[in-house]
Amino acid sequence: MFRVVGAIAASLSLTWWIFAQLLPLQGPLGFVVVSFVLFVALYAVLVSIDDSGPAVRDRVMSVLVHSVAVLMVLALVVVIVFTAMRGSEALPYVNFFTQDMAAAGPLEPLSVGGVLHAVIGTMIMITIALVLSVPLGLLCALFLTEVPGKYARFVRTIVEAMTALPSIVAGLFIYATAVMVLGLDRSGFAAALAITIMMLPIIIRSADVVLRLVPGNLKEASLALGSSQWRTVWNVTLPTARSGLTTAVILGTARGIGETSPVLLTAGFTTYFNFNPFSGAMISLPLATFNLVKSPEPTMIARGFGTAVVLMVLVLGLFALARVIGGRGPGQLSPRQQRRRRLESARDAARFEAVARIDVVETAGYGGVGFQRASAPKEGHTS
């Protein structure tokens, strides 16, 4: 700790001397970069006084890794704080969460209009996308893990390539096929199809990794007891990986909620409520944010950042839920599941005791012969 504090103090002092006295440098970004480089160098020098070369490299790499982690957390905090501050003007108004933008023009005050229509549109689109992507994603992941072979390796390669698919390409594909060729309206359903394409690779890859973590001896035991492969998958593999599969679905959902480009091309734009996903334009939270912040009016920009805050809360809530659900490993039971297992065990014990009493009563009617046959002989006792 003293080495870290000393290196930080020395790097800041030396950087200030370089910027103020030695060289005509200026700017906060340059100051931070030079300070960090000097901090790492000075820390390595301080560690090398008492430790050997491998220890020095280990400490320096540890500092670099922790610095990257701090940088990522700082970037996340800056984004959240900046968005919340810019959207704080619109968030206190109740109508922002209960109205649509049909009666709110560019010059209307923040007391008129809201983003409820975008929230409803997002929920409808993501619900349809989940109905389509969850069965397809889980079945594909089961195919990759349970049916290995050349074709499975080919499918896994395609799925890995689709994880890097630009979202605009998915929107263009649905627009060219469903809208232009099949004549489907630009609607919430078309946007849900594009979102499904973006969610599928995430769900498949995450579920594939989770299913491959299921211990092989559990499946081998099920097969050895005479179960078919389908029964083993349904009764052993899926229950064991249930928490991980739930996490995979939630991660895919979080990816789909934040998509803008596919919705822009396939859903159109509207300022009013539309509960029919198959007819008429429908808007989502990312698309509403994109359109509102483009306006030069301060009130519209405030609404756009407020919409971003609502979207951010949804996404962060989903990731937090994924963290909570995915915290239990395969086979670990929740308190509710443990209570249910204890009740089932108590009922089974009572049933076994009742059956044992019935057997004793029945064998007593035959003069104890049946009881002697049913019970194993003790050591030193002959029947």
Image (tube, rainbow, N blue to C red):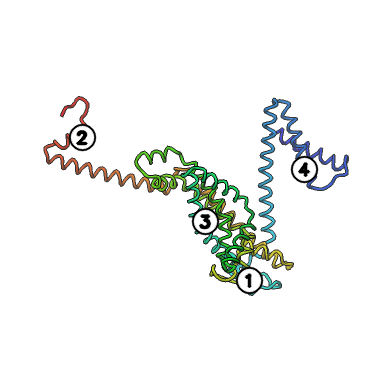
Q: Would you name the residue on which mark 4 appears?
A: 33
Q: In the rendered image, which quarter contains the C terminus?
A: top left
Residue 132 lies, in percent from the top left, at 51, 58
Closer to viewer: mark 3 or mark 2: 3
Mark 3 surroundings within 10 Å by alpha-carbon count, few (fewer than 14), some (14 through 19), many (20 or more): many
Q: Would you name the residue on which mark 3 appears?
A: 133
First in sequence: mark 4 vs mark 1: 4
Q: In the rendered image, which quarter contains the N terminus?
A: top right
Q: Is mark 1 in CB contact (under 8 Å) with mark 3? A: no
Q: Would you name the residue on which mark 2 appears?
A: 375
Q: Residue at x 47, y 44 (%)?
A: 147
Residue 90 lies, in percent from the top left, at 66, 65
Mark 2 surroundings within 10 Å by alpha-carbon count, few (fewer than 14), some (14 through 19), many (20 or more): few
* Residue 219 relative to residue 354: left or right: right
Mark 4 surroundings within 10 Å by alpha-carbon count, few (fewer than 14), some (14 through 19), many (20 or more): few
Q: Residue at x 50, y 50 (%)?
A: 140
Q: Would you name the residue on which mark 1 appears?
A: 101
Q: How far apart, in angstroms, are the residues tagged by discs 2 and 4?
A: 82 Å
First in sequence: mark 2 vs mark 4: 4
